Amino acid sequence: MNLKEFASKLALSQTTVSRALSGYPEVKQATRERVLKAALEYGYRPNTSALGLATGRVGAIGIVFRGGGQFGPHTSEFMGGLGSRLQQDEVDILVSTVDSREAELNAYRRLAASKRVDAVILHSPFVDDPRIALLTTLRLPFIVHGRTEAKGDFGWLDIDNFDAIRQATSHLLDLGHRRIAFLNGHRGQVFAEHRQDGYRAALQERGIALDPELSGNGDFTDEMGFRLMQGFLKLEKRPTAVLAGSMMSALGAMRAIRVAGIKVGEDISLIAHDDVFPYISPENLVPTLSTTRSSIRAAGARIGEMVLDLCRGHRPSTCARSGRWNWSSAIRRGRSVRPLARAVPFP
């Protein structure tokens, strides 16, 4: 059964049927329920091309990744959550990969010109992000995963990165630690700047000056955590505790600590920001890690919901009502953190 035949059985226009099936808000609820019930009864599944002609939508969302460093477990988890949500509405994901910032901007220009996607998801925003202005100029709808200081009316989703790291730092300070190292993301990215601000604020509350030698930046990988942790341990005054921005960098830090012949939870304390990977559990590590917690897979699913709302005609500000992701602000306590006086003999 094609769209014309299905619409005829319901005595409705093809446009009304298509919009009802696509969740457009201007269709009355009673009409939508009638169309959905009939679709189940007749076994009707809309043809993508016909649906696009009726609604102006192509049934695809775009996302552009820059550089090989973005294809890690965080991306896999996010795409898993995003894909699971979009497939419920039979919406596809068009993924592009590029090698430079200029190539990424050109990719958005091509997507807008070709009309192959209904909207795009912009990820890893920078404080001063030219992509926002470009997408606005191109009139290509978008949702931002993260926050940016760029002006405009657009939807975004983010956790409270500032408070996550502020709480973790304060917890270590409460235990007597004063030299706390921090493995952070790349400077300039909004989430990394917010985490740096949270780290600095917690130290300032205790009258402790920020030591630039105790902060490091990079991609959240095992290698990054290992390399930076080795550098921290070579300092004349080594840290007595460390904050890792992800489970992946925490694994690298633990490896460096082990190679140095000292023990996490006995000689040095460690807290990780846990992105809830199904294959790496802080409870199963030795020792068990203390963590802050957020689910990047759940964030992907919520972003999917928001971008679908955007495509259905809702205003970006409406889509962004729940801008801050609901996450557990409490620190889950493992055995990787001990009071300074009991555990760490470093100067």
Image (cartoon, helix red, strand yellow):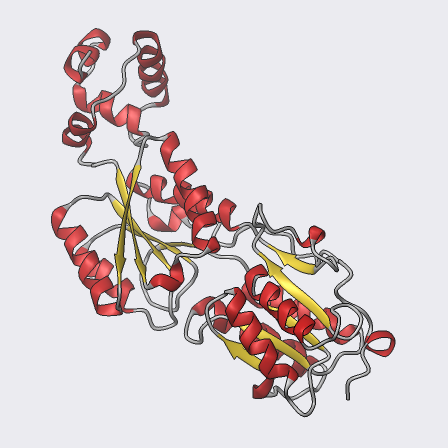
Q: Position of residue 114 (x, y in %)?
A: 12, 48
Q: Residue at x 67, y 59 (%)?
A: 291
Residue in front for this viewpoint, 198 or 83: 83
Residue 321 makes an appearance in the image: no
Image position of 251 (left or right of 100): right
To which quarter of the image does residue 91 belong?
top left
Residue in front for this viewpoint, 328 or 20: 328
Residue in front for this viewpoint, 203 or 28: 203
Q: Position of residue 272 (x, y in %)?
A: 63, 63
User: Outermost residue, right direction?
Assistant: 342
Picture layout, residue 15 above or below residue 102 = above
To which quarter of the image does residue 273 belong?
bottom right
Q: Residue at x 32, y 23 (%)?
A: 28
Residue in front for this viewpoint, 309 or 2: 2
Q: Residue at x 55, y 61 (%)?
A: 248
Count of numbered circles on the image: 0
Q: Quadrant of the N terminus?
A: top left
Q: Quadrant of the C terminus?
A: bottom right
Picture layout, residue 288 above or below residue 215 = above
